[in-house]
């Protein structure tokens, strides 16, 4: 159930602005603002929504601002998106009860969707986005255009498109800045279908009622929490999730991120996701042959046991990961620094064991290799002032563990039915015509 709360009246003189062509430059010298949020759901944790209060770049009150909003994209996710894709009202003008800056959604088209990738959210996470909304307050809004509220949608990648309608504003007057009818604490919950899922707000106000893109619903104070998915340790090393790369809000080919991070060791840092990184033993495997004692005596023998292990990952060869015995690449150095380890990307060790087999026993050796799986992100270092120019590369690697010793199981046990049959079989010899039912003949040779 949606509840309308804290209706605050604010007035200022504001004029109409053309639909496009008046984009302002993005302020690159200011850090991205992060708005953490909290919820009561068990296991929930805050999501870092960049500039969720829309305060950056800073702009003066008194007129609507049509420049890009730091950390967000409009339409395309490349860069900061379409200029004049949204309008911003300062807290002194928005009428928000907490004085928050508000963004006005404009046209009912994908090219004007207002979006951001939610950093730190994994595929499978349950995400709850909280925000505030209001009908348009622009002087261009007619009383009829906001009398029944204004419609928009909110969508997170993996979730259904949620159709929303703001509260109604029965007091709006033409050519006068509206008071705003704010509903705080609106929520939208979805299960992410991808890492860093895209969150999108889009106006659905029809063209006849949006005053040429100058009268649309307002959004403010976006924050989010997530319940991350459990660690899945059933994925085999040969079926690791694919690497993914992002530049700001834009999904990009992995090779581009590799080319960037691999330029110099100081260009990126590797940040492991410790909760999803772990050491483990892979399933036991029979190492070498099974030796079977078909004699009547105990037998003692020695046998070699060799361990070999390789690393798995899908990064392009140029990344140098998984590594080799050659000079470590820049990204290999970043990985080593981020994990505080120096992985043995390829492992080989030789052992010798002594077997003592009793009659009618079989002897064999099973081995379990110690391995480590590491998930994490290569990210631009230092973080750029403009979040839309930040590189982020997600990857998973599986390699021989340095902190786990390999396990060798020396096994003996009773023979199987087929092995017993083999031990009881006649000794193979060449056939002879002298059988048990054939008497011996006379040798007349001299």
Image (cartoon, helix red, strand yellow):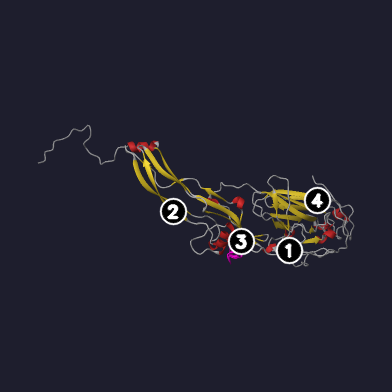
Single out the mark in the foreground, 1 or 2: 2
**Left or right: where does residue 221 sit relative to residue 268?**
right
Q: Residue at x 56, y 62 (%)?
A: 333
Residue of label 3: 269
Q: Which residue is mark 4?
A: 184
**Residue at 13% in and 36% down:** 442
The reply to whether the magenta stretch includes residue 261 is: yes
Magenta residue span = 258-267
Alpha carbon distance from label 4 to label 3? 38 Å
User: How many residues crowd around disc 3 within 10 Å: few (fewer than 14), some, or many (20 or more)?
Assistant: many
Residue nearer the viewer, 364 or 357? 357
Counting residues from the start of the chain, the first of labels 3 and 2 encountered is 3
Label 2: few (<14), some or many (≥20) within 10 Å?
Answer: few
* Mark 1, residue position: 82
**Tag 2, which secondary structure?**
strand
Marks 1 and 3: which is nearer the front?
3
């Amino acid at each position: 159930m949606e509840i309308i709360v804290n209706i605050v009246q604010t007035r200022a003189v504001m004029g109409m602005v053309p639909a496009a062509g008046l984009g302002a430059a993005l302020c690159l010298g200011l850090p991205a603002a992060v708005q953490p949020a909290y919820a009561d759901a068990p296991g929930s944790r805050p999501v870092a929504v960049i500039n969720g209060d829309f305060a950056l770049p800073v702009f003066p009150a008194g007129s609507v601002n049509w420049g890009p909003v730091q950390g967000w994209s409009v339409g395309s996710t490349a860069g900061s998106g379409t200029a004049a894709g949204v309008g911003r009202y300062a807290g002194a003008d928005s009428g928000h009860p907490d004085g928050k800056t508000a963004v006005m959604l404009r046209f009912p088209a994908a090219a004007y969707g207002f979006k951001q990738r939610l950093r730190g959210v994994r595929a499978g996470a349950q995400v709850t986005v909280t925000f505030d909304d209001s009908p348009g307050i622009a002087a261009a809004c007619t009383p009829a255009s906001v009398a029944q509220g204004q419609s928009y949608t909110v969508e997170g990648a993996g979730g259904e498109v949620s159709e929303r309608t703001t509260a109604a504003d029965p007091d709006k007057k033409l050519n006068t800045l509206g008071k705003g009818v704010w509903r705080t604490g609106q929520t939208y919950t979805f299960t992410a279908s991808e890492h860093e899922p895209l969150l999108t707000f889009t106006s659905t106000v029809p063209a006849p009622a949006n005053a040429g893109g100058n009268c649309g619903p307002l959004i403010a104070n976006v924050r989010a929490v997530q319940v991350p998915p459990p660690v899945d340790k059933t994925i085999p090393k040969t079926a690791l999730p694919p690497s993914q790369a992002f530049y700001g809000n834009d999904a990009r080919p992995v090779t581009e991120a590799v080319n960037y991070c691999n330029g110099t060791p100081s260009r990126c840092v590797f940040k492991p996701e410790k909760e999803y990184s772990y050491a483990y033993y892979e399933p036991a495997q029979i190492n070498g042959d099974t030796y079977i004692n078909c004699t009547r005596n105990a037998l003692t023998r020695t046998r070699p046991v060799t361990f070999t292990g390789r690393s798995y990952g899908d990064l392009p060869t140029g990344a140098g990961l998984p590594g080799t015995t050659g000079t470590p690449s820049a990204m290999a150095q970043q990985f080593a620094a981020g994990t505080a380890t120096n992985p043995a990307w390829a492992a080989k060790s030789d052992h010798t064991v002594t077997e003592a087999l009793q009659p009618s026993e079989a002897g064999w050796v099973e081995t379990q290799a110690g391995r480590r799986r590491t998930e994490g992100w290569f990210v631009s270092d230092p973080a750029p002032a403009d979040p839309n120019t930040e590189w982020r590369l997600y990857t998973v690697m599986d390699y021989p563990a340095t902190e786990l010793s390999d396990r060798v199981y020396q096994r003996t046990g009773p023979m199987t039915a087929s092995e017993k049959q083999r031990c009881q079989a006649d000794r193979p010899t060449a056939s002879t015509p002298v059988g048990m039912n054939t008497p011996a003949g006379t040798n007349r040779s001299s």
